[in-house]
Image (tube, rainbow, N blue to C red):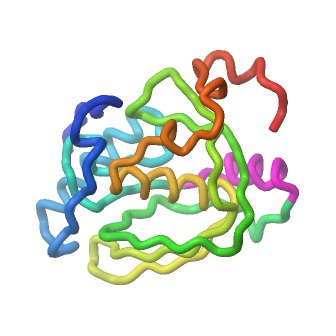
Amino acid sequence: MTLLKISKMGHPVLWRKADPVDNPSDPDIRALVENMIETMNDAGGTGIAAPQIYESLRVFIFFVSPVRAQSEAERLGFELEGDGAVPLTILINPELDFIGDEIDESWEGCLSIPNLMGKVPRHRSIRYRGYGLDGKLIEREATGFHARVVQHEYDHLDGVLYPERMTNMRQLIFSSEVAHQRPD
């Protein structure tokens, strides 16, 4: 496995719509995903999309820790089934649908926009599907942080960074200042 360089806001690879993957079981895709996992873990992220490592392909990976899931569920005032954790998930050629009209705003960061965070509106609940490395279809519904991270990574595949989703640019701040903000 190889630790890869992460593309930063302003690089053209982050602005273009990523290309579909022809064969999810391709050994080159498996190698790419292994490198993405290592890179995400090294950077301390919860997700990463292929364009963030200079590969314009419709692939992203993510996971949700129990702590992060519980924190977001408490903030939004709903009960989780189980601990809310989502194991490391690889999605190739994903599709996304919104469930309902409920929108929540919360702080997001991005490996391609280091040291900044922004308050971003996202749909509270979604349905998504995509293929794993084995070529099998993955279909899930998600709420809370799970839904937020999938929407964030999916945006990368369409050339969208979270500041473009923000409604108030005064809420684009340095990560170190988030603790000084009023609670959500």
**Is the stretch drawn in magenta largely helix, strand or loop?**
helix
- The part of the chain drawn in magenta is 64-77
Direction from residue 102 to residue 173 in the image, left or right: left
Q: Tell me the quarter of the image containing the C terminus.
A: top right
In magenta segment, residue 86: no
Could you tell me how many numbered marks the image carries? 0
| Quarter of the view holding residue 126 | bottom right
Q: Is residue 166 above or below residue 104?
A: above
71 on left or right of 116: right
Q: Can you give x and y, in whole percent of width and height, for residue 30 in the image?
A: 21, 62
Q: Residue furthest right?
A: 77
Q: Is residue 21 left or right of residue 171?
A: left
Figure check: 74 above or below 86: above
Residue drawn at (60%, 61%) of the image: 147
- Of 163 and 64, nearer the camera is 163
Tell me the quarter of the picture where residue 99 sits.
Answer: bottom right
Q: Residue 144: image x %, image y %?
A: 69, 58
Q: Position of residue 118 (x, y in %)?
A: 60, 32
- Give 167 or 81, whichever is nearer the viewer: 167
Kindly identify the residue that appears in the image at 66 percent across and 67 percent down. Answer: 125
Residue at 72 percent across and 52 percent down: it is: 104
- Residue 85, compared with residue 11, is above or below; it is below
The quarter of the image holding the N terminus is top left
Q: Measuring from the top left, give residue 131's x and y in whole percent.
A: 34, 75
Is 114 drawn above or below residue 23 in the view shown?
above
Residue at 22% in and 42% down: 13
